[in-house]
Amino acid sequence: MPEDSDFFVRFWGVRGSIACPGAAWAAYGGNTSCLEIRCGRQLLIFDGGTGLRQLGEHLKSEAPLDADLLFTHSHLDHIAGIPFFSALFEPSNRFRMWAGHLVPERTLRDVICSMMAAPLFPVPIDIFTAETSYHDFTAGDELAPRPGVRIRTTTLNHPNRATGYRIEFGNRSICYVTDTEHVPGKPDSNVIDLARDADIFIYDSTYTDEEFPRYVTWGHSTWQEGIRLANAAGAKTLVIFHHDPSHDDSIMNEIAAAAEHSRPGTLVAREGMVLRP
Ligand SMILES: [Zn+2]
Ligand SMILES: [Zn+2]
């Protein structure tokens, strides 16, 4: 069991858009977005991409769990792991699920039901035996899901909307900002405010600045914009995240070297990586 004051993030999925298994992606990892954040004894999970399946295996020895699962948004690469998350099939577990991008038109429960419905999926959400509850909020709201954990949120620039999170525990902070598109030359003040003086700033770095013009309106950003935002916000460690499936390990190594040169200490997220703010 973690120490009461321990605060860390572990990456279970770092990829954007679609999982990409294969030898050429193995060093950074092929699973889509999923983070485990521990605030002392409290477990928070951010996004339910394909990385969620392995996190479920990792959590098996910890039942009964009382945890929160928060979604940036509900594009498939952020929710596809939910039906395969074994912790939802353990009756002694309790999960609160959160999303800030859906109301008033939809609810999180309704969206997960739509994914787990015939003919897309063979079984409905009733198969979950854990106690689950669904909580919709509006991006911009502040959440206090657990004692001592403060979560600030903001709205991101993404098709069908998305929510950026800042998790504060003790005097430290982790900021998780994916999926979002920037406007060149106009740094997003919502993101700068959220990432202000953050210890760890995880940012949608799907593309490079050179690739970006081909993907305007697709809803993603670049590692170079991540550096500009981290500098503007005074964030400490920038973590490049939501890697494009076309960026295999050799391309990610080049990005890592270029980012280290531009802003020393910048990290590229890899599956299994653990960071303590
Ligand atoms: Zn995504
Ligand atoms: Zn998305």
Image (cartoon, grey):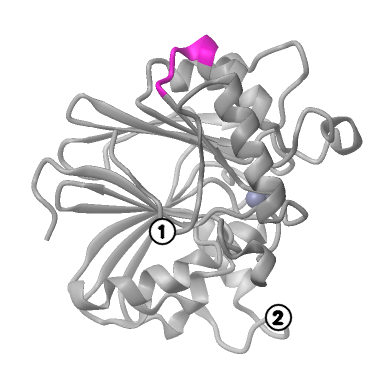
Cα distance in 3D space between marks 1 and 2: 30 Å
Left or right of 276: which side holds 154? right
157 versus 145 height, above or below: above
Q: Position of residue 89 (x, y in %)?
A: 35, 82
Q: Is residue 235 magenta?
A: yes
The image shows a total of numbered marks equal to 2
Q: What is the quadrant of the N terminus in the image?
A: bottom left
User: What x and y, as percent, mark residue 207?
Assistant: 74, 38
Looking at the picture, how far across and down is residue 59, in whole percent?
28, 71
Residue topped by disc 2: 120
Magenta-tinted stretch: 231-236
- Residue drawn where x is 57% and y is 18% of the image: 229
Name the foreground residue: 204 vs 80: 204
Nearer to us in this view, 195 or 277: 277
Across and down, in percent, residue 123 comes to 56, 87
| Residue tagged 1 | 272
Crowd tier of the residue under label 1, counting other residues whose Cα lies within 10 Å: few below 14, some 14–19, many 20 or above: some
The C terminus is located in which quarter?
top left
Residue 191 vs 18, above or below: the answer is above
Could you tell me which secondary element the residue under label 1 belongs to? loop
Foreground pick, 215 / 65: 215
Residue type marked 2: Leu
Q: Quadrant of residue 143?
A: top left
Looking at the image, which residue is at 61% across and 52% down? 106
